[in-house]
């Protein structure tokens, strides 16, 4: 069974140009469209653990957002068979003035959960993330590690068939990383599909079995994770 | 769009609106009631100023000013805040699949909640200056709903254009401030002449005039009411027609 079927996907986005004073109202001159994902095709089977490698700006995060349905491709198709959760950036759409509890509740409500379901899962997140009294403090005072704990706990508190992670929990301390690995292991055994974009060879080796190497919006290599790391590091 | 999708959009927008309101007034003693006090101070100041200019008592003007200022606050806040809306909600848009119309609706609902708080100032003004509450005040609620519906599409457009054309972000709040003087908030339009035409051709004045005519002249179905409904229908139809041709705003974030 397939988790994702990606066929000839193209995604462009605009880059801003310097405003020309000779053409101040020519808005089209201010934007230059650049292809970020270029004719990408691949499939991911259910239960597969795929690592995405590549230099900065290669299109890894954009590809994860396309897979999750946050971005829509300009052309080509993406078939998603399973439901998915995402850990994409350090902000996670959270409000800095609100507490960890309120942000957790809000994220779960946005994800479509009812008030009661969100309240129950928030209690579970509180237990898992181990933030203690800080769970009720505004997240603007959190360190990046505390934020990573909270985001990972929210994203994985409910079982999802697919987890899409961009760097993810690397910022958290060793104790929480061990906890996170345990939760991910449970997901592997429940045959969840994991797609993980990272620059860390050790994280990729530990969590993935297959590797995709992206360069300038194209997939240059698709194979085992060890071969993908070797290809990425040595060309 | 199916019924459940519309319901979901409303549910998430309302949740986001409350979240935003809590975030804005986090750790304050009065919370959203601060906005009510702000309006009360503006009303007090403008009632005195208008009374000084016209040589009358502030009590004569306060009820009209209260209605005008409460509705104007809703409209101007929605339009001014729309310029930074998608940048402010960048994190939410890039980490979830909610639509840009949900985010726009959130802004309008949040300002609608603030309007409901501000309505208490309007009611208090009538009780103090008018010795009672006129029946037409009940129209504040349907006018609020109609104005909020009419504001959603302009909020989406302003928010989109502000991301693409950065100049608008700086320029539009000035235009909104300028429009305040062209809209019958501090003054009442005469029956003819330039000011009358200005009121008819300025959509920002329609919700204010609908309410003022209902409250003070018992004219419930005025031409402004019909114009407001027409604008609402035309906006929604035009947006649904043009929506497919618009690029996703996430590309620009």
Image (cartoon, rainbow, N blue to C red):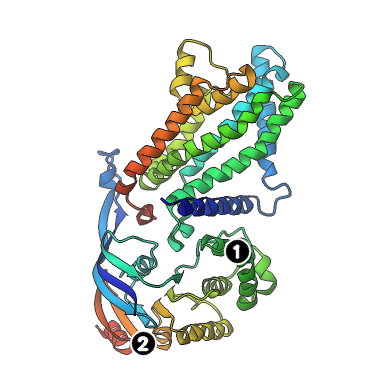
Disc 1 target residue: A105
Q: Is residue A142 above or below residue A48?
A: above
Q: Position of residue A128 (x, y in %)?
A: 61, 78
Q: Quadrant of residue B216?
A: top right
* Residue in front for this viewpoint, B55 or B212: B212
Q: Position of residue B3 (x, y in %)?
A: 46, 51
Please give the chain letter of the residue carrying mark 1.
A
Disc 2 target residue: A209
Q: Give the mark, 1 or 2, whose residue is nearer the N terminus.
A: 1
Q: Is residue B8 above or below residue A4?
A: above
Distance Cα–Cα, label 1 vs label 2: 34 Å
* Residue in front for this viewpoint, A64 or A91: A64
Q: Position of residue A52 (x, y in %)?
A: 34, 77
Whether residue A66 is visible here, answered yes or no, is yes
Q: Is residue A7 left or right of residue B150?
A: left
Whether residue B73 is visible here, answered yes or no, is no
């Amino acid at each position: 069974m397939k988790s994702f079927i990606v066929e000839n996907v193209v995604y462009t986005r605009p880059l801003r140009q310097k405003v020309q004073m000779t053409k101040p109202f020519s808005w089209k001159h201010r934007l230059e469209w650049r292809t970020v994902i270029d004719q990408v095709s691949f499939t991911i089977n259910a239960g597969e653990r795929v690592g995405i490698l590549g230099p900065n700006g290669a299109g890894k995060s954009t590809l994860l957002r396309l897979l999750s349905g946050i971005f829509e491709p300009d052309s080509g198709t993406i078939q998603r068979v399973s439901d998915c959760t995402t850990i994409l950036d350090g902000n996670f759409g959270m409000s800095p003035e609100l507490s960890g509890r309120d942000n957790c509740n809000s994220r779960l409500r946005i994800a479509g959960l009812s008030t009661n379901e969100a309240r129950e899962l928030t209690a579970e997140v509180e237990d898992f993330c181990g933030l203690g009294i800080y769970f009720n403090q505004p997240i603007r005072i959190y360190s990046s590690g505390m934020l990573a704990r909270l985001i990972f706990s929210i994203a994985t508190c409910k079982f999802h068939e697919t987890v899409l992670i961009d760097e993810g929990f690397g910022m958290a301390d060793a104790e929480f990383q061990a906890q996170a690995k345990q939760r991910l292991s449970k997901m592997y055994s429940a045959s969840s599909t994991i797609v993980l974009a990272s620059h860390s060879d050790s994280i990729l080796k530990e969590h993935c079995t297959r590797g995709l190497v992206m360069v300038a919006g194209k997939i240059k290599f698709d194979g085992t994770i060890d071969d993908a790391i070797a290809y990425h590091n040595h060309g | 769009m199916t019924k459940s999708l519309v319901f979901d959009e409303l549910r998430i927008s309302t949740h986001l609106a409350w979240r935003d309101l809590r975030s804005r007034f986090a750790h304050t003693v009065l919370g959203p009631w601060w906005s009510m006090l702000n309006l009360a101070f503006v009303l007090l100041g403008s009632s005195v100023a208008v009374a000084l200019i016209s040589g009358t008592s502030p009590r004569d003007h306060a009820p009209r000013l209260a209605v005008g200022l409460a509705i104007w606050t809703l409209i101007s806040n929605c339009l001014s805040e729309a310029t930074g809306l998608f940048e402010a909600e960048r994190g939410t848009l890039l980490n979830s699949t909610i639509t840009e119309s949900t985010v726009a609706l959130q802004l309008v609902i949040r300002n609608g909640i603030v309007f409901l708080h501000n309505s208490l100032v309007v009611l208090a003004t009538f009780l103090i200056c008018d010795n009672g509450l006129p029946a037409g005040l009940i129209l504040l609620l349907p006018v609020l709903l109609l104005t909020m519906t009419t504001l959603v599409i302009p909020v989406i457009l302003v928010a989109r254009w502000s991301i693409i054309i950065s100049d608008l972000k700086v320029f539009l709040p000035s235009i909104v401030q300028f429009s305040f003087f062209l809209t019958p908030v501090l003054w009442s339009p005469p029956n003819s002449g330039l000011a009358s035409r200005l009121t008819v051709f300025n959509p920002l004045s329609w919700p204010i005039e609908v309410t003022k005519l209902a409250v003070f002249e018992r004219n419930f179905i005025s031409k402004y009411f019909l114009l407001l409904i027409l604008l609402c229908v035309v906006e929604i139809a035009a947006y649904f027609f043009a929506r497919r041709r618009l690029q996703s705003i996430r590309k620009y974030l």
